[in-house]
Image (tube, grey):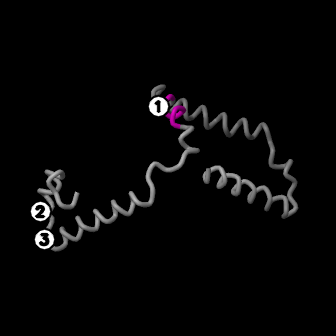
Amino acid sequence: MFIAIGYLVTLGSIFGGFAMAGGHLAALFQPLELLMIFGGAAGAFVTGNSQKNIKATLKAFPGLFKGAAYNKEVYVDVLAMLFEVLAKVRKEGLMSIESDVEEPEKSQIF
């Protein structure tokens, strides 16, 4: 939802500012330029990628409008764990985390 609102605010600011500065919005709409830009981009994308990648991209495209998969709590937890690991390395040396990395299920950190 916030992504759609962000897009609307961005486009509204760009076009609104252009119009308020005395520009004519009709000057921005050039169908042939749009055809050249988007057609060229689509052609380059198809040329530069395999059919598998193109299908995966088209399948993932609707995900642009969904929210993030992770929230602030997850990021804070990861940063806290990273802090613990780096503090241990600083105090005890790099080899001190070898057992934590080799067997994370037995580690106090992970």
Residue appearing at x 55%, y 45% in the figure? 66
Q: CA distance from mark 3 to mark 1?
A: 45 Å
- Amino acid type assigned to the residue bearing label 2 in the image: Met
Give the residues in magenta. 55-60
Q: Nearer the viewer, mark 2 or mark 1?
A: 2
Instruction: Name the foreground residue: 97 vs 38.
Output: 97
Q: Earlier in the sequence, mark 2 or mark 1?
A: 1
* Number of the label disc, if any, that sits on residue 10: none
Looking at the image, which residue is at 66% across and 34% down? 39
Q: Is residue 19 left or right of residue 34?
A: right
Q: Residues within 10 Å of mark 2 (few under 14, many from 20)?
A: few
Task: Between label 3 and label 1, give the one nearer the viewer.
Answer: 3
| Percent of width and height locating residue 4 | 65, 49
Separation of disc 2 and disc 1 at Cα?
40 Å
Query: Is residue 69 positioned above or below 94 on the image?
Result: above
Disc sitting over residue 53 in the figure: 1
